[in-house]
Image (cartoon, grey):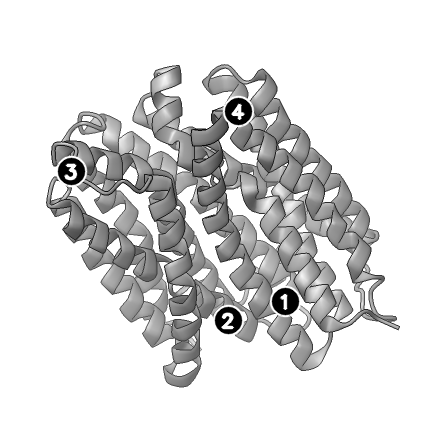
């Protein structure tokens, strides 16, 4: 007999949040580490995005492995990889290159915790319980990102930056406790396959699925770009306002901005069901382009105005991700859904890596982090993500 859906959902969702403590560690520490290791904006972009590159590279292999063996084994190995990588940053990293390597490995480990956790959830539940659990698990991902910022900010202030990665490693190990509560999958409910990789070719023929995959790529380009560059931009604005700003640490502010976006994400997803996902995603994406333009224009503007715009951007950039995810699930079929979700993750997180890097390159080319014009171009590069998402929704495919 399977475990209670509530126990399974809570266990895997809490496990996901614990595994996520590493995800925003570098963005939270970017200003401190840039000064410590004398990094330019390009290197900040590399360190901020390489975690998502590791995720994208590992996902097809891990998805294939989980289809050939018990997902709990893959989850265990992935968590150990992630923990080892985070501990290694704390113990061995003394500059850009080693940190880059260890963060890439941490991203590989998190791909296993995130996607394999999602698969184990689906394998153990059916019907309405499965649908509700998936929504809860998706919300847990967003909450985990916010917690990562908050924990990193607190631990770096209290114990130093190395403690952030020690706590992230401990979080990955603690995520393994979820395996004690979920039990085996329901009889006949776990899909087995001999394929090494998901069947991406079948998905590439489906233009409606590809529409939402492209939209997700644009979404994560912008979402991860602003997550990586939120703290440095806010530090720049405070300096431009001659130090005026709240006593609250910027990492706390960005963490709270993530939490604020979560309920809007649920509301926008529901509006997509009622009014049509394509129209809702198009409107939200265009709104995000406008907000990016205002942020670039007001880079040295009043702190209160810039902070308000950043909080709004957190909603417009992340708010439609639930509608996009719902779109790819609805557009795929039972035969193609697993491959569609794998492609969804690979392409999305690949662009999640490229977005922060592209912003860093733009800042360096425009004069560096101390130049207002550089931040204007930074937000124009971020806005490209929503331009892509809006274009994917507006594109008229042939029947």
Identity of the residue furthest to the bottom in this view: 274
How far, Cα to Cα, is label 1 from label 2? 12 Å
Upstream in sequence: badge 4 or badge 3: 4
Q: Which of marks 1 and 3 is in front?
A: 3
Up/down of 209 relative to 141, above or below: below
Report the residue marked by disc 4: 162
Dot 1 alpha-carbon crowd within 10 angstroms: few under 14, some 14 to 19, many 20 or more? some
Q: Position of residue 16 (x, y in %)?
A: 62, 52
Report the residue marked by disc 3: 244
State the image quarter where residue 309 is shown: bottom left
Upstream in sequence: badge 1 or badge 2: 2
Q: Where is residue 221 in the image (x, y as percent from the top left)?
A: 38, 48
On the question of residue 195 being in view, the answer is no
Q: Which of marks 1 and 2 is in front?
A: 2
Please tell me the numbered disc located at residue 326. Answer: 2
Upstream in sequence: badge 2 or badge 4: 4
Helix or strand or loop: what does disc 2 sit on? Answer: helix
Q: Nearer the viewer, mark 2 or mark 4?
A: 4
**Residue drawn at 83 percent across, 61 percent down:** 183
On the question of residue 86 being in view, the answer is yes
Q: Mark 1 and 4 residues: CB-CB less than 8 Å, in contact?
A: no
Upstream in sequence: badge 2 or badge 3: 3
Q: Where is residue 281 in the image (x, y as percent from the top left)?
A: 35, 69
In the picture, measured across the screen, residue 49 lies left or right of residue 381, that is right
Report the residue marked by disc 1: 337
In the picture, measured across the screen, residue 190 lies left or right of residue 209, that is right
Q: Mark 2 and 4 residues: CB-CB less than 8 Å, in contact?
A: no
């Amino acid at each position: 007999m399977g475990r209670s859906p509530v126990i399974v959902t809570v266990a895997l969702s809490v496990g996901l949040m614990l595994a996520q403590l590493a995800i925003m560690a570098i963005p939270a520490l970017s200003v401190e580490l840039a000064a410590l290791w004398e990094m330019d904006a390009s290197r900040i972009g590399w360190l901020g995005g390489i975690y998502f590159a590791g995720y994208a590279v590992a996902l097809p292999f891990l998805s294939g492995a989980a289809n050939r063996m018990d997902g709990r084994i893959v989850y265990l190995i992935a968590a150990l990889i992630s923990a080892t990588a985070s501990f290694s940053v704390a113990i061995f990293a003394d500059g850009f290159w080693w940190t880059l390597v260890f963060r890439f490995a941490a991203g590989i480990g998190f791909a296993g915790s995130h996607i394999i956790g999602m698969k184990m959830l689906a394998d153990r539940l059916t019907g309405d319980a499965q649908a509700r659990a998936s929504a809860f698990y998706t919300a847990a991902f967003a909450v985990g990102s916010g917690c990562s910022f908050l924990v990193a900010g607190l631990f770096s202030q209290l114990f130093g930056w190395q403690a952030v990665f020690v706590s992230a490693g401990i979080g990955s190990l603690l995520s393994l406790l979820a395996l004690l509560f979920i039990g085996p999958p329901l009889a006949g409910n776990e899909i087995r396959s001999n394929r090494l990789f998901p069947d991406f070719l079948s998905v590439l023929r489906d233009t409606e699925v590809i529409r939402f995959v492209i939209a997700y790529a644009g979404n994560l380009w912008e979402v991860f770009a602003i997550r990586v560059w939120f703290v440095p931009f806010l530090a720049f604005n405070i300096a431009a306002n001659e130090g005026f700003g709240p006593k609250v640490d910027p990492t706390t502010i960005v963490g709270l901005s993530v939490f604020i976006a979560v309920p809007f994400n649920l509301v926008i997803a529901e509006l997509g069901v009622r009014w049509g996902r394509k129209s809702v995603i198009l409107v939200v994406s265009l709104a995000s382009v406008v907000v990016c333009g205002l942020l670039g224009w007001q880079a040295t503007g009043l702190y209160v105005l810039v902070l308000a715009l950043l909080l709004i951007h957190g909603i417009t950039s992340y708010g439609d991700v639930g509608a996009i995810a719902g779109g790819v699930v609805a557009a795929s079929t039972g035969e193609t859904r697993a491959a569609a979700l794998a492609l969804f993750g690979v392409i999305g997180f690949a662009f999640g890596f490229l977005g922060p890097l592209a912003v860093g390159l733009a800042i360096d080319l425009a004069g560096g982090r101390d130049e207002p014009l550089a931040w204007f171009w930074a937000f124009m590069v971020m806005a490209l993500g929503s331009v892509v998402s809006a274009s994917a929704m507006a594109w008229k495919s042939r029947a």
